[in-house]
Amino acid sequence: MQADRAPKNFRDPTTESSAAKWSVITIALLFLAAVLVLPLAAVFTEALRRGWDAAWLAMVNRETLEAMQLTLLVAAIAVPLNTVFGVVAAWAIAKFEFKGKTFLTTLIDLPFSVSPVIAGLIYILLFGSGSFLGPVFNSFGLQILFAVPGIVLATMFVTFPFVARELIPLMQDQGTGDEEAALSLGANGWQTFWYVTLPNIRWGLLYGVLLCNARAMGEFGAVSVVSGRLRGETVTLPLHIEILYNEYNFVAAFAVASLLALLALVTLVLKALLERVYGPRQSLRH
Amino acid sequence: MTAAQASSTRWRWRQPGVLPGFGPALGFTICYLSFIVLIPLAGLGLRSASLGWAEFWRIATDPRVVAALSISFWTSFVAAVINAVFGVIVAWALVRYDFPGRRIVDAAIDLPFALPTAVAGIALTAIYAPTGWIGQLLAPLGIRVAYTPIGIVIALVFIGLPFMVRTVQPVMEEIGKEVEEAAATLGASRLQTIFRVLLPGLVPAILTGFALAFGRAVGEYGSVIFIAGNIPFVSEIAPLLIYIRLEEFNYPAAATIGCLMLILAFVILLSINLIQFWSRRRLGHAS
């Protein structure tokens, strides 16, 4: 409207000149290229430095496959448990009014502000030598540290808040009207949850699970503290990358790294697609 | 239903409602939270407290510990400052301008969240090593990035970027055009409008993003250890020192450094929150 009547060289006073605009875009894109694109490109170039065959051999190597199995196993335990927790916690926090709610939400977010190394450290202190719990579990023949249970626990700690923090604001926005209607129509509690609440939160839930899974499969710091690096037993994919790298087996390290980079790319694409169906982007901080 | 009825009479601090399952849901939440997060974290505090003040102080003032903590905190600070500057520029470009590939760029911002830290670590090392893509350009100038604190800063910039952009972006999207139009009608130049009207409104969001990026950077491990070179007193970060002490089975020292990191991070984040509170009141913008 305004542009039609305005003189040719008129510029809307709330926009910048196109020279300013394009220099800001150029600076932003150059920065992102240096910070984001370059590392990603480096992973794939280094992996293919000796050609496809060398990279492929590193990927189907027995130790890589064992590491992959462990990573999948750990994610398969930690992600569903944290998902159930996230849904239950969001139900309690978002659908009811009680005192201490903000405090509880803060506590759930706590693992995000703790260093992954400290996440590993606390389980060492809890189950390691000189602790109270370690000997108790050992007497039942159950090894926690430097074994799979420790890795699962450390992973659960670092991925703890993902699903809950995605669902709490979503379920708070949705309120309790739908559930109350279902109950008044004679549905019982479970029916209300399965047929009313769950369909309402499905995209948000999927979103949380996606992010939780990406972190669970990629976690390095916490897992490296509790793992002990027993080959074929407690080496996850990220740890396997570190071992290969420290052995100066760079092509293999980057080949395995490119698998995890692909996982990250798939996660990003799914995340962008989910944001499209799921409406406005939720602020994510992790 | 019975559980809900029972719990509503037992707990007066809850407002009455008709939805079932509050008791079991809250009970499960608190148990799970306690077992996975609270009890293990409390163990860290107990283990450091059981050392006694003198021993705690001796470990805390050990020169290598002090050096590691200060390297961790100042590299995180520098990285967060760099992210504050470029994060605002990136958010500005994404919110205000349309350019080819904007949606892809927007989605790519989250890459550091999705990419495992160990992968980022070896990739950055490969780029900035003296033989790498950028390293070989800087080497003739006498600048070494990999295996120095500069390398740590670069890894932390990578890790912290999405925190800044994703905090500033939604606030920037909500700034109404009226403010800018009012500034323009009052005779402000475009630069004056940006620096004296728009950016002050973003300060609280920038501080929040700064705090988040800083908090994450202080504890970061995976992406840093490959590029840092890990030379004690030069490029050894606090989380790595915890790791080294654990490998030596020196649990008291590891617990103490962990405790110190948590306390320092908490104090710094608290002061950033105070600055944020102050700036929000002073600038009179809600965000």
Image: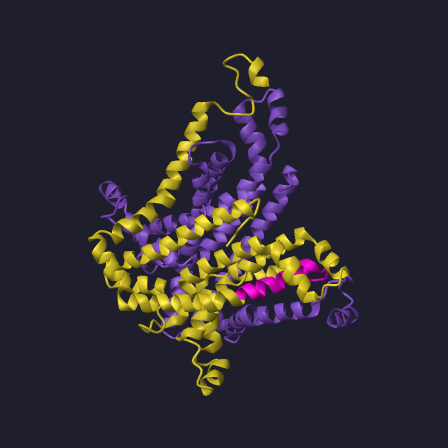
Chain colours: A yellow, B purple
Residue A16 colored in magenta in the image = no
At 74% from the left and 58% from the top, the residue drawn is A180
Q: Quadrant of the N terminus of chain B?
A: bottom right
At 45% from the left and 74% from the top, the residue drawn is A149
At 53% from the left and 44% from the top, the residue drawn is A276
User: Residue A167: image x %, image y %?
Assistant: 60, 56
Q: Quadrant of residue B138?
A: top left
Is residue B75 visible from the viewing direction of this image? no
Q: Nearer the viewer, residue B20 or A242?
A: B20
Up/down of B86 relative to B255, above or below:
above
Q: Quadrant of the C terminus of chain B?
A: top right
In magenta, the rendered stretch is: A82-102
Up/down of A240 relative to B80, above or below:
below
At 62% from the left and 52% from the top, the residue drawn is A170
Up/down of A181 relative to B13, above or below:
above
User: Residue B201: image x %, image y %?
Assistant: 59, 36
* Left or right, residue B275 beside residue B71: right
User: Residue B194: image x %, image y %?
Assistant: 54, 29
Q: Nearer the viewer, residue B248 or B133?
A: B133
Query: Most prominent secondary structure in the magenta stretch?
Result: helix
User: Residue B225: image x %, image y %?
Assistant: 35, 58
Single out the residue that lies furthest toward the left.
A50
